[in-house]
Amino acid sequence: MSRSNLLPQAFWFRLAIPCQRIEPLPREKGRLLDLPESCRLPDTAALDSAPTWADVRAAWNPGGLAFSVEVTGKIGPITKDPLGLVQGEGLQLWIDTRDTRTIHRASKFCHRFGFFLKPSAKNLSIVTSQKPIARAMADAPMADGDDILTRADLIRNGWRLEVFFPASTLHGFDPETNRRLGLTYQVTDLEREDCFLTIGRDFPIGEDPSLWSTLELVDK
């Protein structure tokens, strides 16, 4: 068996993904973001003929950074624990505002955020968290979770989650001097295997920024 068959195909790639500038974000009416198809991040699951069930998009402007995820094809309801909190369904993001590809331990510019769904009878709310990154050389400052704008909606056979990070919530975010960010994500739906931007938890993606992809902030 060849080495390439033992590893996911995404392991052999380090993506540099254009991230479109969208004005204005967040939106004043309707959806928080409503990002267009042109903002969709690549589907690397197809490299291993794996099913695609999460549509993840990203955009930016000088005011901050935006992400949306739309999950479709769910069969059952969102899973809850006895306290009513979803056990892990949602989105985790790792963001390096310096895109330092040569380090294996996170710096103070590396952030880890989680956005987990909390269902109610008619809709969804979101539990926002920021956690230190294991083995980090230095921790990013803790953002005020109330400053991060979020919205979640039930959709047909799934859910949608939108997140906007104001520039002040991401230490080192400065598009005037740096247009390259490190990025990886994990989308969790308990009915299926997690979705990742490239490689998954078989590798130390949660603590090694050299395994993350690059998000290039472009004007068009």
Image (cartoon, rainbow, N blue to C red):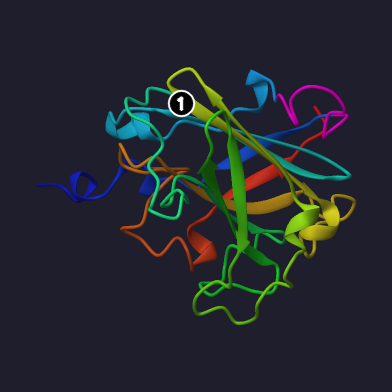
Visible residue check, residue 70: no
Give percent across and percent down for residue 97: 72, 59
- Total residue callouts: 1
Circle 1: residue type: Gly
Image coords of residue 87 (percent x, y): 41, 52
Residue 111 magenta-drawn?
A: no
Which residue lies at the image location 43% right of the left edge and 51% below the top edge?
88
Question: The residue tagged with tag 1: helix, strand or loop?
Answer: strand
Q: Nearer the viewer, residue 48 or 62?
A: 62
Q: Is residue 192 left or right of residue 155?
A: left
- Give the labeled residue for mark 1: 158
The residue sitting at 58% across, 73% down in the picture is 132
What secondary structure prevails in the magenta region?
A: loop
Q: Position of residue 198 (x, y in %)?
A: 43, 45
Q: Does the magenta stretch include residue 24?
A: yes
For the C terminus, which image quadrant? top right
Magenta stretch, residue numbers = 23-34
- Residue farthest left in this picture: 1
Q: In the image, is 50 to the left or to the right of 121? A: left
Using the image, determine if residue 50 lies above or below residue 13.
above
Q: In this view, does 204 lie above or below 148?
A: below
Q: Viewed as shown, does residue 192 lie left or right of 142?
A: left
| Horizontal side of residue 79 vs 118, given as left or right | left
Write down the quadrant of residue 96 in the picture. bottom right
> Residue 24: x percent and y percent?
88, 30
Front-most of 192 and 134?
A: 192
Is disc 1 surrounded by few (<14), some (14 to 19) or many (20+) residues within 10 Å? Answer: some
**Residue 196 lies in quadrant:** top left
For the point 46% across and 26% down, the residue is 158
